[in-house]
Image (cartoon, helix red, strand yellow):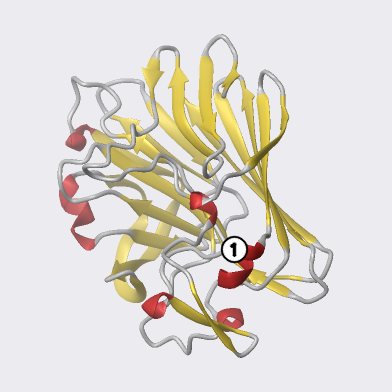
Amino acid sequence: MVIGNDALKVTLKSAGAEMTSINYRGIEYLWNGDKKYWGRHAPILFPIVGRLKDNKTVIEGKEYEMSQHGFARDCDFQLNLATSTMACYRLKYNEETLKKYPYRFELSITYEVMENSVKVTYQVKNKDDKTMFFSIGGHPAFRWPLLESEKFEDYVIEFSEKETANRISVEDGYVYETEDLLLKDEDTISLSKKVFDIDTFIFHHLNSKSVTFKSKKSEKAVILHFEGFPYLGIWSRKDEAEFLCLEPWFGIADRKETNGIFEEKPGINRLEPKASFECSYKIELQ
């Protein structure tokens, strides 16, 4: 389905409750999902972010298996509510999810178009009578470059505040801390494909509440507002795939030395019985 206004159109699908197009004033901002490189557009990461060690974890003394980023992105959501500018999708626990994740949950994803922005809201409800543990995050992939006349090197990432921050790196799907200060009282990262020789890089507890992916040669830009999210992942492939992901996360992948106990994962979230959790991020187009 399509929601939007005269300037901004957002296309959504029930499979994974995923955005498949963000078209602003005739320019497509979202990656096309070319399976040659990466066949997704903006998947929802739930109930894990990243990879579990050996794709396994222990919950309440029992071993469960989940693939990278969890199962929500591969589930069919129900369209729960829709208007011309808003759509809400819902996924409830079922026999298949309980085999992988033994919690009774309800996950709602709401998309709302406002002028030149789309707001994405995640709501997690614990429908169980026990404490629930989970991670959740966004994975929107934007076209890079946004205009055919531009090159990868014509773009930068600009933080809303000057940052001094180590990067958390990813190797073979596992995260590890580094002493590498990627930002040293700086607010800008110059982009090229070489930057992603290290795969994903992740920031934890930034001062910035937004980050801008923008061209140095045109006025085109994507501003991701991620206030409240403890982690921000930035990823592209090091080949010629023409996308860049800006990923706000409540959670993170396992370390190699993990003990495998789900509730002790770094970045895991705790939700009491019958309680709910909500967070949102906003994509602003220029």
Image location of residue 250, percent across then percent down: 57, 61
The vertical placement of 105 against 123, above or below, is below
Q: Which one is nearer the viewer's eye here, 155 or 50?
A: 50
Image location of residue 175, percent across then percent down: 36, 72
Residue under numbered circle 1: 96
**Where, by quadrant of the figure, is residue 174 drawn?**
bottom left
Q: Few, some or many C-alpha atoms within 10 Å of disc 1 (few <14, some 14-19, many ≥20)?
A: few
Q: Quadrant of the C terminus?
A: top left
Q: Is residue 35 left or right of residue 266?
A: left
Q: Which one is nearer the viewer's eye here, 42 or 201?
A: 42
Q: Is residue 233 left or right of residue 123?
A: left
Identity of the residue drawn at 26% across and 22% down: 147
Amino acid carrying mark 1 in the image: Glu
Pick out the residue farthest to the front.
Answer: 95
Q: Which one is nearer the viewer's eye here, 162 or 249?
A: 249
Identity of the residue drawn at 52% across and 41% down: 15
Image location of residue 95, percent across then percent down: 65, 64
Q: Is residue 129 left or right of residue 4?
A: right
Identity of the residue drawn at 37% across and 36% down: 142
The vertical placement of 112 against 248, above or below, is above
Q: How many marks?
A: 1
Look at the numbered disc 1 and give the secondary structure of its residue: helix
Identity of the residue drawn at 30% across and 26% down: 146
**Where, by quadrant of the figure, is residue 198 drawn?**
bottom left
Q: Is residue 38 left or right of residue 207?
A: left
Image location of residue 190, percent across then percent down: 25, 44
Q: Quadrant of the N terminus?
A: top right
The vertical placement of 105 against 43, above or below, is below
User: Can residue 31 be seen by looking at this rendering?
Assistant: yes
User: Can residue 286 be seen by looking at this rendering?
Assistant: no
